[in-house]
Amino acid sequence: MLTAIETLALSKLKSSAKVRSVVTPGKYKGTVSVTVDYDLTVGEDEAYTPTVKIGQLPVMALALRKAGFMGPEIIKMVTEAASELAEGGGLALNEVCSDIESTIKEIQSGLSSDLPKKVRKGKINGKVSVVSAQ
């Protein structure tokens, strides 16, 4: 029975894309004994802010709903800003708001600090190699 770390080492060894180019279609059956050397480092779990998974349009729609009576006016401003950017090919961004970079950084900072954190498993790094196969 393999230990969890041995199973992990074997999973890192998979290279089916390389092998598939030299194996013809068909059914294969067999047994092989393999000796594998591994040197793995499993990192600590880490907290992150999952902003990439949050779509911009749903966020804007919810913000507009929360804006109440000001929602229609905000929609008008967002539409005007999008039109200006579309017409200027992105150049309008610098013309319209010279301090846009600081505004973007302020928004990003707020998202990073205020959104709930999630935890992802630590990264796995290392080397795995087949020493012998019989």
Image (tube, rainbow, N blue to C red):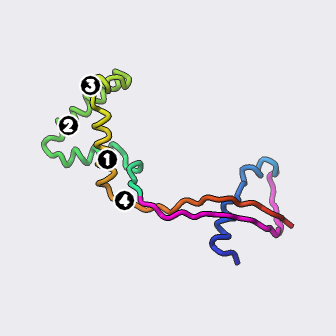
Is 45 a magenta residue?
A: yes
Magenta-highlighted residues = 24-47
Sequence-wise first label, 1 or 3: 3
Above or below for 127 versus 107: below
Real-space CA distance between mark 4 and mark 1, rounded to the nearest whole angstrom: 14 Å
Label 2 and label 4: CA atoms lie apart by 29 Å
Q: Position of residue 19 (x, y in %)?
A: 77, 52
Of all residues shown, which one is farthest toward the left? 69
Local packing at callout 4 (Cα closer than 10 Å; few below 14, some 14-19, many 20+) is: some
Classify mark 2: residues with Cα within 10 Å, few (<14), some (14-19) or many (20+): some
Assign a secondary structure to mark 3: helix
Q: In the drawing, what numbered circle is on residue 96?
A: 3
Q: Which residue is mark 4?
A: 117
User: Is 10 on the left or on the right of 99, as rendered?
Assistant: right
Closer mark to the observer between disc 2 and disc 1: 1
Q: Which residue, given by chain and number where applicable, does mark 1 sit on? A: 109
User: Which residue type carries mark 2?
Assistant: Ile
